[in-house]
Image (tube, rainbow, N blue to C red):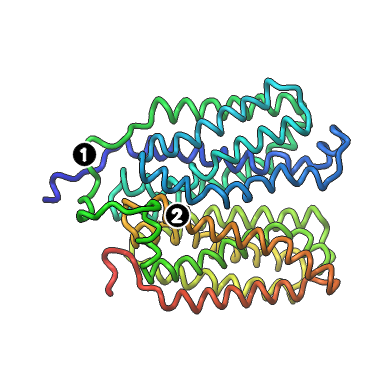
Amino acid sequence: MDQQYRVYGYRWVVLGIYMFVAALTQLYWLNFASIATYIEEMFKIPASDIQWFTLIFPLVQVLLTIPAGIIIDKIGFKWGVGIGAIFTGLFALLRIFVPPSFEMLLIAQAGISLGQPFVLNGVTKLATMWFSPKEEATVVGLGSLALFVGMIVSLGLTPALVQDMGFSQMLWIYGIAGLIGMLAFIFFIKPRPATPSRAPEQDQPEVKWGGMGVILKNRNFLLLGFVALIGIGVFNGLTTWLEKILHDMHNMALTDAGNVSAVLIFSGLVGCFVIPFISDKIGRRKPFLILAPLVGALCITALIFIQGYTANMLNGIALGFFLISALPVMLTMSAEITGPRYAGVSVGYLQLLGNVAAVILVPTIEGLNSATGQFVLPLIILAVLLLISFTIALFIRDTHPGAAV
């Protein structure tokens, strides 16, 4: 009977703490990206060395995302994600108490990156454990929104802190934030609610490899994997080179190009809340999964032709709002397809595909630009990839419990 299942107000506390820790992982990821020149002069190292501060994160994500998802499914949300919160907090503190050097900062970044897969793969487990099915997309959207808050804070606040207070003081502030996140997760996150938020799944036999064999037999999930492969890869590739694309193709000042990039991420942040909320309200997922790659392909194509700061700003707003907001929709659909039991490993699989694509597309875009002397061909390829994603999305069945089959 439905009366034996309920949700608690405390679920919002759990979500808030998770969002704080998730935002921190992205803050630390881009911590040194916005002060690369300062780091270069400080340690007398080339820019090719500085890039490892950020590249270590997607590389570790590729290696650990599936194991992290399996561990979360095995030991539960609190300690599965708690592993990530502990790695994040401890290695953020390490940056305070060791002499600042390139080697020690890279070790600290590597330690934080070890925690990231455990944190990012926990959002659907949180949604299915603490929230009702009607709230799932909204919760996953808020969890995704936190990631972009962390990016924006890191890119915007870090240079100001270093300029006004100094490099060491910046590390202290961020280190204390990591400590707060770690302690809050350990002491305030409960292993599970007193009463389940939903009916349990039907009895299922124990499986090997954390359920990978089960979820990969699901046609709907396999198709969703291809959409994630293309969508996450294109987003990472585009955002990595967007400033250079705008500068080289449209002679846009670097500050203006940076503003377009920031607005793209901010509009995606808004979309990560608005789109999942609407999805929950109307009881549909598929329309938004279809809309994202279609609008993305149109906006990327527009990048080739449109001129001027205002036009590119509006294009960036549309691109960020629709393309980025597809992430929480995809993650919610993965949990609805595979069920709460495999919520962690299913998200891990999607993250794996997306990060593999990113590792391939990021250097490919620059390689094609170097070979042709312009970004036209890379942008055409990205647009075509999104059109392929759009076509695949048409064949995915809607996963919302109230959607018509």
Q: Position of residue 58 (x, y in %)?
A: 62, 50
Q: Which residue is outermost to the top?
A: 97
For the question of whether residue 253 can be seen, the reply is: yes
Q: Position of residue 384 (x, y in %)?
A: 62, 77
Query: How would you rate the neighbour count of disc 1 (Cα within 10 Å): few for under 14, some for 14-19, many for 20 or more?
Result: few
- Residue 373 position by quadrant: bottom right
* Residue at point 38%, 70% (across, down): 220
| 197 displayed left or right of 216 | left
Name the one closer to the observer, 276 or 62.
62
For the question of whether residue 288 can be seen, the reply is: no
* Residue at point 45%, 48% (across, down): 142
| 374 displayed left or right of 292 | right
Q: Which mark is residue 347?
A: 2
Position of 231 relative to 164 (above/below): below
| 252 displayed left or right of 391 | right
Q: Amino acid at mark 1?
A: Thr
Q: Secondary structure at mark 1?
A: loop
Q: Which mark is residue 144?
A: none
* Residue at point 75%, 37% (across, down): 159
Q: Secondary structure at mark 2?
A: helix
Q: Which residue is outermost to the left?
A: 1
Does label 2 or label 1 sit earlier along the sequence? 1
- Residue 101 position by quadrant: top right
* Residue at point 54%, 25% (across, down): 179
Q: Position of residue 232 (x, y in %)?
A: 57, 61
**Alpha carbon separation for disc pair 2 and 1:** 25 Å
Q: Which residue is mark 1?
A: 195
Q: Amino acid at mark 2?
A: Val
Which quadrant does the C terminus fall into?
bottom left
